[in-house]
Protein backbone atom coordinates (compact mmCIF):
# COMPACT_ATOMS: atom_id res chain seq x y z
CA UNK A 1 0.00 0.00 0.00
CA UNK A 2 1.29 3.50 -0.78
CA UNK A 3 2.10 6.19 1.73
CA UNK A 4 -1.07 8.06 2.74
CA UNK A 5 0.58 10.77 4.82
CA UNK A 6 0.01 14.24 3.44
CA UNK A 7 -0.10 16.87 2.36
CA UNK A 8 -1.93 15.70 -0.76
CA UNK A 9 -1.47 17.69 -3.97
CA UNK A 10 -4.77 18.03 -5.85
CA UNK A 11 -3.78 20.29 -8.73
CA UNK A 12 -0.82 22.62 -9.07
CA UNK A 13 -0.56 24.62 -5.89
CA UNK A 14 -3.79 23.26 -4.36
CA UNK A 15 -2.91 20.98 -1.47
CA UNK A 16 -5.08 19.19 1.11
CA UNK A 17 -3.38 19.11 4.51
CA UNK A 18 -3.38 15.72 6.25
CA UNK A 19 -5.04 17.39 9.27
CA UNK A 20 -8.20 17.97 7.19
CA UNK A 21 -8.58 14.30 6.23
CA UNK A 22 -10.09 11.59 8.43
CA UNK A 23 -9.28 8.01 7.40
CA UNK A 24 -11.27 5.04 8.73
CA UNK A 25 -10.45 1.41 8.00
CA UNK A 26 -12.86 -1.44 8.69
CA UNK A 27 -13.80 -4.89 7.56
CA UNK A 28 -15.71 -4.95 4.35
CA UNK A 29 -18.96 -6.87 4.26
CA UNK A 30 -19.64 -9.07 1.31
CA UNK A 31 -19.93 -12.63 0.10
CA UNK A 32 -17.64 -15.27 1.48
CA UNK A 33 -17.51 -18.04 3.99
CA UNK A 34 -15.97 -18.32 7.40
CA UNK A 35 -12.57 -16.62 7.73
CA UNK A 36 -12.78 -15.16 4.22
CA UNK A 37 -11.67 -11.58 3.65
CA UNK A 38 -10.98 -10.86 7.31
CA UNK A 39 -8.53 -8.05 6.67
CA UNK A 40 -9.49 -4.41 7.06
CA UNK A 41 -10.35 -3.91 3.41
CA UNK A 42 -12.90 -1.08 3.50
CA UNK A 43 -11.63 2.49 3.57
CA UNK A 44 -13.65 5.62 4.29
CA UNK A 45 -12.10 9.04 3.75
CA UNK A 46 -13.86 12.06 5.21
CA UNK A 47 -13.12 15.65 4.20
CA UNK A 48 -14.99 18.75 5.40
CA UNK A 49 -15.53 20.39 2.03
CA UNK A 50 -17.72 23.19 3.38
CA UNK A 51 -15.17 24.40 5.93
CA UNK A 52 -11.82 23.77 4.28
CA UNK A 53 -9.48 26.66 3.61
CA UNK A 54 -7.34 24.54 1.28
CA UNK A 55 -9.53 24.92 -1.82
CA UNK A 56 -10.44 28.04 -3.80
CA UNK A 57 -13.94 29.27 -2.94
CA UNK A 58 -15.21 28.72 -6.50
CA UNK A 59 -14.13 25.04 -6.35
CA UNK A 60 -15.88 24.56 -3.01
CA UNK A 61 -19.11 26.13 -4.25
CA UNK A 62 -19.11 24.03 -7.42
CA UNK A 63 -18.35 20.80 -5.55
CA UNK A 64 -20.94 21.49 -2.84
CA UNK A 65 -23.56 22.09 -5.53
CA UNK A 66 -22.69 18.98 -7.57
CA UNK A 67 -22.37 16.70 -4.53
CA UNK A 68 -25.31 18.10 -2.54
CA UNK A 69 -27.20 14.78 -2.53
CA UNK A 70 -24.17 12.83 -1.30
CA UNK A 71 -22.94 15.12 1.49
CA UNK A 72 -24.04 15.50 5.10
CA UNK A 73 -23.38 19.05 6.36
CA UNK A 74 -20.71 19.56 3.71
CA UNK A 75 -18.77 16.43 4.70
Image (tube, rainbow, N blue to C red):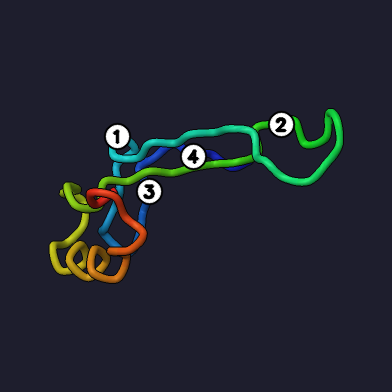
Q: Earlier in the sequence, mark 2 or mark 1?
A: 1
Report the mark closest to the observer, 2 or 1: 2
Please give the residue where the numbered disc 3 appears in the rendered image: 8
State the mark number for residue 3: none
Q: Earlier in the sequence, mark 4 or mark 2?
A: 4
Q: Residues within 10 Å of mark 2 (few under 14, many from 20)?
A: few
Residue at image x 65%, y 40%?
28
Residue 12 sits in which quadrant?
bottom left
| SS category of the residue bearing label 3 | strand
Q: Nearer the viewer, residue 19 or 50?
A: 50
Residue 11 sits in which quadrant?
bottom left
Please give the residue where the numbered disc 4 appears in the rendered image: 4
State the mark number for residue 39: 2
Q: Work out whether 28 lies above or below 13.
A: above
In the image, residue 9 lies at what x, y percent? 36, 54
| SS category of the residue bearing label 2 | loop
Amino acid sequence: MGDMSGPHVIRGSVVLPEAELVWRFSRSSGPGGQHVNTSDSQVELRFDLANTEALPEVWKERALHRLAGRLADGV
